[in-house]
Amino acid sequence: MRLPIFVLAQLLLCALLVVSCVTEFQPDTVSIPPSLIIEGQVTDQSGPYVIKLTRTADYSYKSLNLLETGATVIISDNLGNKETLKEQAPGGTYQTTGLQGVVGRSYKVSIQTKGGKKYESDAEILSAAPLISKIYSEYTKETGGVSSAKNQGWDVYLDTKDPDAPGNYYRWVWTHYEFTDVCSKQDQPNGTIKGLGCCSNCWNITRCYTCINITSDVNINGKAISRQFISRVPYKSTSAYYIEVQQQAISKGAYDFWKSVRQLTSNTGGLFDAAPSTVRGNVHALSDPTEMVYGYFGATGISEQYMNVDRSNGEGTPDIDPPVFVPQPSACVVCENSLYRTPNKPRWWNF
């Protein structure tokens, strides 16, 4: 993300002063008001649903978000149903226990912080996502040069059908699960990697957190959506690559939010790039309308599908990760359930 112009100017001034003066110049810290960041959504899939609250810290050379603990977080619908979320350890993450999203209802989140500040999101109508008609992959190889594993891969696409009614917006996300029997790795002085095994079945999780894959039906209303690109599978093994794909029906507000985020993160810093802008979400401070609040609370319809990408037709030796040596006997490491690893068997796993 590009730094604001005033920060760049200050850093440039600092550099000039350090070069021209004997005494080192220590610039003043740039402070910004602490602002709340909201991440979370309700879907038409089974919960629990998670709301994550953090707060921005002062600007420094390392970005830092502080956990917003001790808040009261309530999700409610337009029929008067509501649930107070339960805070999870170590804090800042709030989870439902019984709420189930229903297509056609609208949802909003209300937040009261430990300090007494109140926030509320705009209401979002939960729309159903059309079914994924087909999911498939195509092998491609870059031309020119010596053939290698790194210039080979499988592009994953899907086909679907946009509903006849206008005003539909989509987002696509994917998750790759890979079985692992090593839950801890440590580089050794001799260049090898030593590991410890998992105490139970365990899967590593890969997602693309910077991929913002969205579209609207402005130009395709009621038509088929064909060859929608999802992801590129690397040639790191000849075994099947397990991938789950979500087709999300999002609101126009969520579409505009992600479109702004994509535009902001895709700027290269060139002379003719648009200046950095603030991406505001749909959550507002009730006591102070001028207070900045970041993030988005959404109501999302989901259609899911999976595939096992066949990588047996790759050419040559795959780009295999370095081997991990696990001494025997040795202690095992618990496979913790997190964003990057899980002991829970993936939904369609059949290996």
Image (cartoon, helix red, strand yellow):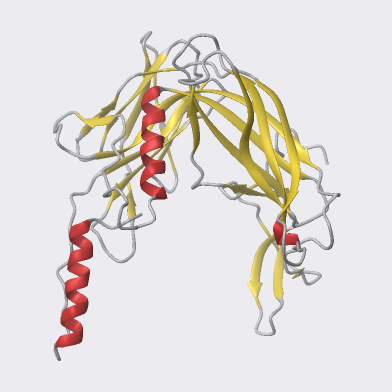
Looking at the picture, does residue 119 appear above or below residue 179?
A: above
Kindly identify the residue that appears in the image at 48 percent across and 16 percent down.
127
Instruction: Between residue 6 and residue 89, name the one nearer to us.
Output: 6
Would residue 199 be visible to someone looking at this image? no
Looking at the picture, does residue 309 appear above or below residue 101?
A: below
Residue 60 lies, in percent from the top left, at: 27, 64
Instruction: Between residue 294 and residue 312, name the one nearer to us.
Output: 312
Quarter the N terminus occupies? bottom left
Q: In the drawing, does residue 314 fall left or right of residue 136?
A: right
Q: In the drawing, does residue 124 fall left or right of residue 27?
A: right
Residue 56 lies, in percent from the top left, at: 28, 50
Looking at the picture, does residue 315 appear above or below residue 280?
A: below
Kindly identify the residue that appears in the image at 18 percent across and 28 percent down.
286
Q: Quadrant of residue 255?
A: top left
Instruction: Between residue 96 and residue 221, name the one nearer to us.
Output: 221
Residue 106 lies, in percent from the top left, at: 39, 15
Instruction: Between residue 279 and residue 289, name the one nearer to us.
Output: 279
Residue 73 lies, in percent from the top left, at: 34, 30
Would residue 1 be visible to someone looking at this image? yes
Farthest-out residue, front:
144
Q: Quadrant of residue 118?
A: top left
Kindly identify the residue that appears in the image at 24 percent across and 45 percent down.
35
Q: Quadrant of residue 351?
A: top right
Looking at the picture, does residue 115 appear above or below residue 132?
A: below
